[in-house]
Image (cartoon, helix red, strand yellow):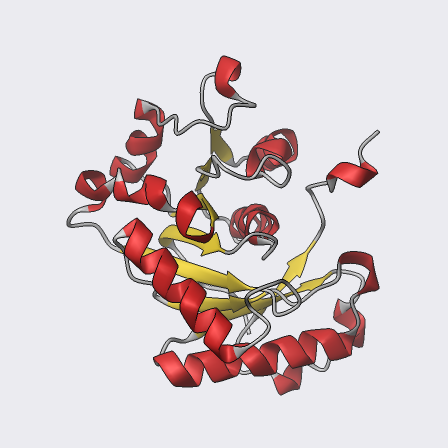
Amino acid sequence: MEINLSGTIIIAGNYGSGKSETAVNLAATGRARGLSVKITDLDLVNPYFRSREARQPLEDLGVDVVLPDPKYMHADLPILTPAVAGIIQAPAELTILDAGGDDVGVTVLAALADVFKGRDIQMLQVINPLRPFTETLDGCLTIKKEIEESSKLKVTGLVSNANLIDETTPEIIYDGYDLVRRVSDATGLDIAFITASTRLMPRLDTARFTCPVLPIDRKLAPPWKRI
């Protein structure tokens, strides 16, 4: 199965869910499918994993990366530029908004309510069951509720991003998928896709999944691995 997402996609989730890594890889996959792609980084809270760090690799692929003015690149302030509203008003075939983590991070989306009005917007909740607060069904549902209340938007789909970075095994991905499937059953939301690192793809039994798999080629270095 292939990922056939298009239109404007908001990637949301709790801290450590891997939403930024998911966002940049979804953008790269969209370009590989031949789509025009735009991505903007709305993560104004988490200073470590931000899609803006992948700017050059994405631009090399032909992705239009919209970021704040350079003097704000490392700011942790709610800075929204006209360019951000612009990509929503004039979207590409695939436009990705990488939102901040948890309910605090997605409050910036509420400020874009007028821009979103009347537009077909999808918001995907990225779930990593190996992170705090999303180890259980109830935890995942609580995060979903908080995201929706703060963003003034509804989650429209789910993403399973079960991983322990380099220690991830196929069993971890299977278990994560099983939990997100329970979230799907409880909410009636479809699982848009699950993720798996490119090194694990040959070892996965994809027949176990009823949704596509997004191969993850890590583009955001964790702070402890930066030189």
Residue ID at (66%, 80%): 175
Q: Is residue 60 visible?
A: no
- Residue 71 lies, with reference to residue 121, above or below; the image says above
Left or right of 195? Residue 106 is: left
Left or right of 206? Residue 39 is: left
**Residue 217 drawn at (x, y percent):** 71, 51
How many dots with numbers? 0
Q: Is residue 176 visible?
A: yes
From the viewer's side, name the closer residue of 207 and 76. Answer: 76
Residue ID at (51%, 61%): 126
Q: Quadrant of the N terminus?
A: bottom right
**Residue 220 drawn at (x, y percent):** 68, 41
**Residue 185 drawn at (x, y percent):** 42, 85
From the viewer's side, name the closer residue of 149 and 202. Answer: 149
Left or right of 154? Residue 171 is: right
Residue ID at (34%, 44%): 107
From the viewer's side, name the closer residue of 92 and 98. Answer: 98
Where, by quadrant of the figure, is residue 18 drawn? bottom right
Residue ID at (46%, 68%): 158
From the viewer's side, name the closer residue of 120 and 152. Answer: 152
**Residue 28 drawn at (x, y percent):** 58, 47
Q: Quadrant of the C terminus?
A: top right
- Residue 195 lies, with reference to residue 9, above or below; the image says below
